[in-house]
Image: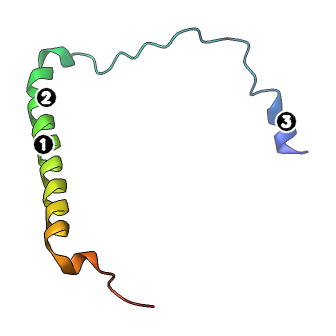
Amino acid sequence: KNMSASFKGSNSSKFQVSEFILMGFPGIHSWQHWLSLPLALLYLSTIGANILILTTIYQDPSLKQPMYFS
């Protein structure tokens, strides 16, 4: 018997979801301020590293040329 035909009827649902509530992590409110500090430092270090890469590419002329010619 064809598997897709046998599962076709069992995958239907008569219930409609009218709303979805995202609860997050329970109990995080007590230490969310302490969690924001390392995440902000990680974000700022990522931005700083990207700026460093862009300034290195901008200042070094050899990085603006192709590495090989075909």
- Choose mark 1 or mark 3, whichever is in front: 1
Q: Position of residue 69 (x, y in %)?
A: 40, 90
Q: Residue 44's mark?
A: 1
Outermost right residue: 1
The answer to which quarter of the image holds residue 49 is bottom left
Local secondary structure at mark 3:
helix
Local secondary structure at mark 1:
helix
Outermost top residue: 18
Q: Position of residue 12 (x, y in %)?
A: 76, 23
Position of 61 relative to 40 (above/below): below
At label 2, the amino acid type is: Ser
Q: Nearer the viewer, residue 66 or 13?
A: 66
Q: Residue 36's mark?
A: 2
Residue occupying image coordinates x 23% and y 76%: 63
At label 1, the amino acid type is: Leu
Give neighbour class at mark 1: few <14, some 14-19, many 20+ (Cα, 10 Å): few
At label 3, the amino acid type is: Ser
* Lower position in the chain sequence, tag 1 or tag 3: 3
Q: Pointer 3: what residue? A: 6
The answer to which quarter of the image holds residue 11 is top right
Q: Nearer the viewer, residue 35 or 46?
A: 46
Q: Position of residue 45 (x, y in %)?
A: 11, 48
* Lower position in the chain sequence, tag 2 or tag 3: 3
Instruction: Using the numbered discs, state the Cα–Cα distance from disc 1 to disc 3 in whole angstroms.
Output: 53 Å
Q: Quadrant of the N terminus?
A: top right
Position of 1 relative to 51 (above/below): above
Residue occupying image coordinates x 19% and y 55%: 50
Q: Quadrant of the C terminus?
A: bottom left
